[in-house]
């Protein structure tokens, strides 16, 4: 079996082969990374750790700036509008880059970006301990019985939590009602306080409340179980085997048009730097994510299936404003 390190360095080699030769980039001023969500969420936490390690690799300060609003589209728009000189980077879930256009939020798609993936992330279906739900089947029954009053907190239909909830809806044949918050932490806190009864936000955003017993996790919304502290969380596919792909990757993104030497320099240091990051490994171990640094064509190839599943899921549930086909996103084929 190949180790994570072996796969990571294979990804690095594939990335290097896919890139044209370019001069080494030596930034002469600080770099700004825009996090399009509030402080404390998964993107903010992971990006800040990655930025600290990357500073050492490229020899320049990296400033992380939170610019939340409109499910991440405001901060992403700021990156799109900034000069394409390599000094302004975006961040967020890689899947969002492919669904902003489907939602009619931004005129952009995955091919408009150079993705640099940091970590794999999964959502968790959790409930307020007083919600009277002890299982995935119980959650499904609650939604069927009272869909208007059994509220699920997310950061919107195209967010990781929203996509995860919609995957459950598709697999279980239910229509849960989302209550939308501007960030993963507010959505989680709303569930803790009882403003919402459940949440499908990311494990990394829920971890502290799960360990403290203030959220009751029912299942990881994916195909692999997860352990947070001493709490073991089963995979939801044990109950819903036909669940569509709902995992996501968090990363940093350079817009198309960024100087080739910037893209190549970052590609050369990316995998080795983050694969060896003790801080990133510690964060993921305690907060429920997986260290997964890839770049270049490898990152794009891994992102496409997630984008396609999310985009067509939004379209099929009448939540999209633009057909994915119009944007060149092929419908996933049934396995």
Image (tube, rainbow, N blue to C red):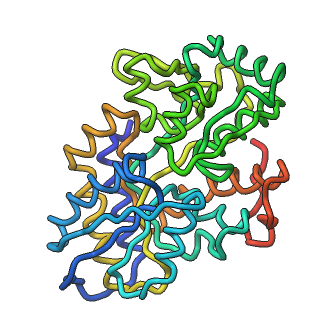
Q: Residue at x 32, y 80 (%)?
A: 87
**Quadrant for the C terminus in the image:** top right
- Where is 247 relative to 228, above or below? below
Residue situated in front as seen by the camera: 253 or 264 = 253
Report whether 157 appears left or right of 60. Answer: right
**Quadrant for the N terminus in the image:** top left
Q: Residue at x 58, y 25 (%)?
A: 194
Residue situated in front as seen by the camera: 147 or 92 = 147
Q: Quadrant of residue 311?
A: bottom right
Where does residue 308 sit, x and y in percent of width and height? 69, 56
Where does residue 47 sit, x and y in percent of width and height? 34, 56
Report whether 314 appears left or right of 252. Answer: right
Q: Residue at x 70, y 20 (%)?
A: 139
Q: Quadrant of residue 259?
A: bottom left
* Number of marks present in the image shown: 0
Where does residue 74 sit, x and y in percent of width and height? 54, 68
Q: Residue at x 60, y 50 (%)?
A: 159
Report whether 43 appears left or right of 96. Answer: left
- Where is 243 relative to 120, above or below? above
């Amino acid at each position: 079996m190949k180790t994570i390190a072996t796969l990571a360095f294979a990804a690095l080699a594939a990335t290097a082969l896919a890139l044209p030769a370019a001069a080494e980039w030596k930034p002469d001023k600080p770099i700004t990374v825009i996090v399009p969500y509030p402080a404390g969420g998964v993107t903010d936490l992971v990006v800040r750790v990655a930025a600290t390690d990357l500073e050492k690799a490229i020899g320049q300060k990296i400033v992380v700036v939170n610019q939340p609003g409109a499910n991440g589209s405001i901060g992403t728009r700021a990156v799109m509008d900034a000069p394409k000189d390599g000094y302004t980077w975006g961040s967020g879930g890689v899947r969002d880059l492919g669904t902003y256009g489907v939602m009619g939020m931004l005129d952009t798609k995955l091919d408009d970006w150079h993705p640099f993936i940091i970590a794999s992330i999964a959502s968790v279906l959790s409930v307020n301990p007083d919600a009277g739900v002890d299982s995935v089947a119980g959650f499904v029954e609650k939604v069927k019985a009272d869909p208007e009053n059994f509220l699920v907190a997310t950061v919107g239909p195209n967010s990781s939590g929203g996509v995860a909830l919609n995957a459950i809806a598709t697999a279980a044949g239910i229509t849960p009602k989302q209550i939308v918050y501007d960030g993963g932490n507010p959505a989680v806190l709303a569930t803790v306080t009882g403003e919402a009864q459940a949440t499908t936000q990311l494990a990394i955003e829920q971890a502290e409340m799960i360990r403290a017993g203030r959220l009751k996790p029912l299942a990881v919304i994916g195909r692999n179980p997860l352990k947070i502290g001493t709490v073991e969380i089963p995979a939801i596919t044990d109950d819903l085997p036909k669940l569509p792909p709902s995992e996501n990757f968090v990363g940093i993104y350079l817009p198309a048009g960024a100087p080739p030497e910037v893209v190549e320099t970052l590609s050369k240091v990316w995998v080795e730097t983050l694969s060896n990051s003790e801080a990133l490994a510690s964060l993921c171990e305690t907060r429920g994510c997986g260290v997964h640094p890839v770049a270049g064509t490898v990152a794009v190839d891994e992102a496409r299936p997630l984008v396609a599943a999310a985009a067509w899921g939004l379209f099929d549930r009448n939540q999209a404003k633009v057909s994915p086909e119009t944007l060149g996103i092929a419908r996933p084929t049934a396995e």
